[in-house]
Amino acid sequence: MDTEKNAVRIVAHEAHAARLGIFNGQSLSDARALVPDLECHSRDRSTERELLGSLAAWCERYTPLVALDGEDSLFMDVTGCTHLFGGEASFIADIETRLAAQGFTIRTCLADTAGAAWAMARHGTGRVIARDQHAQAISALPLAALRLDAALVKSLRRVGFKTVGCIADLPRAPLAVRFGAHLLDRLDQALGRQDEIISPLMPVAELASEKRFADPIVHEDDIKRGIGILAGNIIHLLERRDLGVRTCEVKLFRVDGEVLSLSVHAANPLRDADRIAALFHERLARLHTDLDAGFGFDILRLNILQADPFNGDQHDLVERKDAGDSYGALIDRLGARLGTDRVLQFSFADTHIPERRFSLVPVSGRDGKTDPDQVTLPGPAHAPTRPLLLLERPEPIDAVAQVPDSPPSRFRWRKVLYEIARFEGPERIACEWWRDGRASLSRDYFRVEDTQGYRFWLFRYGLYERETTRPDWYMHGLFS
C-alpha cells in the first residue's frame, strides 16, 4: 500500500486477492471493509529498486542486454538467444518457471519491438507475438498499452479513441497537432515503424565465454577448473583480433537467483589462459569464506570488459620467455590478491617543491602500461644532496641561528636537542606563487650533521626582512 491522492491505496496485491474484490488503486478502507483481516504492508521503494536490480543481474543469464523500465519491469534484448533454449516458447517458459520457483509472479511477452512486448505483457494475454503481427496483436488493447500518461489517455477517450486500433490507421498530421508527436512516437515504436534503443544496466562485454552445467557446481576446485576452460576458450578470439586482456570478470549464477561477480585487472595486455585463470585463483583466495555457493552455480561466464592491442615483447633467446613477464605476473598476482588500488609505484611531478616531486599511483595506470623501469634510482657517485627519508610533511623545530643566512647552531626536534657540528648550504627553493599564492614564502635548505653523526635536511621558511621578520624552521628529511 502507498499514499496516493491523499489516501492510502492498494498498489499491488497477490493473485488470489482479486477473487475477494481487491484491486489496484482501491483505498485501504474499502479493502478492509471487504476483508477485515487483510494483511497490508507499506511500500518500500528503495527495497523495490534493489530487488529489481538483483533481478536484472539474474536475467543476464539469458542476455547481457538487460534494461530497467520504470519501477517494476525489465526489458531484455534476446536477439539471437532464444534458439539456445529450444525456441521462443521454451525460452519464455524457462524464465517463468525459474522465477516462479523463487516466489515471483510475473507477466512476460516476447516480441520484435519493446513497445509491443510491454503492451501485451501489461494489458494482454499473449506470451509470444509472431513476426510482423504487432498491429493485429495489440490493436484491441487499450491506449494505455502505448505507455502514454493518464492525462493523454483520458483526452483520447474523450473523443472516442479507446483502443490502439482506433488510431493506428488515422491520418497522422491531425493526431500530432491535437495530441502531440509523442503519441505517434509511441505508436510507431510499438508497431516497429520506429527504432527504440534500450540502455543496458551493465556495460556489454567486448568478448564473452560461457559454460552451463547440468548439475550445479559447489566446490572451489570445480569453479577454478571452469574458469580455466573459459579462459582457454577466449584466447583464440583475442588472437583473431590481436588483443590482450586488461580487465575481465567472471559471473557465477547461483541456482537460487543470486549472482556473484569477480573482476581482475592485468598490468599489461594479457593473452595467456593460465595466467588469466591464475588471477581469478588469487581473487578466490582473497574471498576466503565469503564465497557462498548455496545450492551451487549452474552458469559461469567470463566477460572481457577491456582489451588493448597486444604487442608481443622480444623473448629471451635461451629461456624463450618475455623479459618483463615475471614482473608483470607479480603485479597481476598482487593486484588480484590485494586489489589493484593497493599496488603502487612512484610517479614524478613537474615541480621543484620537494614534497610534491613525487606521488604514489597504482601500477596499473589509466594509460594501460606498466614499465618496470619507470622509476630508476641510480647509484650515487657522490654524497646524495637529497635525504633518503623525506617526511610526509615538514615538521616545525625550535632553532637558534643568526640571521639572515646562517644555519642553526642548535635545534630541538621532537623534544630532543641537537648540536650542529657541520653544515652545507643554503640551497634556496622559491615558492610556487601560481599554486600557493603570492604570499607564499621561499625556503633555504641546509644539510646539517650533529655531534653524534646524525644528518638532517632542514630549512628556514621565509627570507629575513624581505618576506618575513620572524622566519620559522622546519625538519624535512633524514639522511642515512
Image (tube, rainbow, N blue to C red):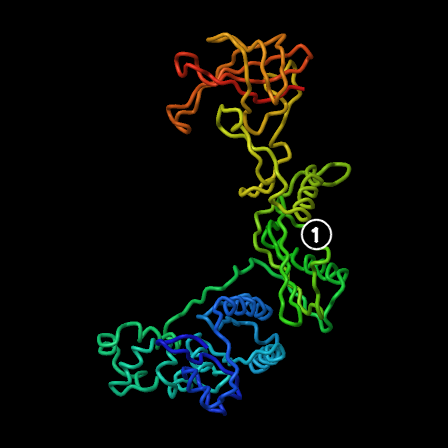
In the rendered structure, the answer to whether residue 451 lies left or right of residue 87 reads: right
| Type of amino acid under label 1 | Arg
Residue 133 visible: no
Residue at the spot 56% in from the left edge and 57% down from the top edge: 206
From the viewer's perspective, is residue 416 above or below residue 375? Answer: above
Residue 40: image x %, image y %?
Answer: 50, 80
In the rendered structure, the answer to whether residue 161 lies left or right of residue 13 reads: left
Residue 92: image x %, image y %?
Answer: 56, 80
Q: Quadrant of residue 327?
A: top right
Residue at the spot 71% in from the left edge and 65% down from the top edge: 293
Label 1: how many Cα within 10 Å (few below 14, some 14–19, many 20+): some
From the viewer's perspective, is residue 142 above or below residue 340? Answer: below
Mark 1 lies on a secondary structure that is: helix
Q: Quadrant of residue 205?
A: bottom right
Residue 385 visible: yes
Q: Residue tagged by mark 1?
A: 286
- Camera-side residue of 123 and 114: 123
From the viewer's perspective, is residue 196 above or below residue 289? Answer: below
Residue 303: image x %, image y %?
Answer: 60, 59
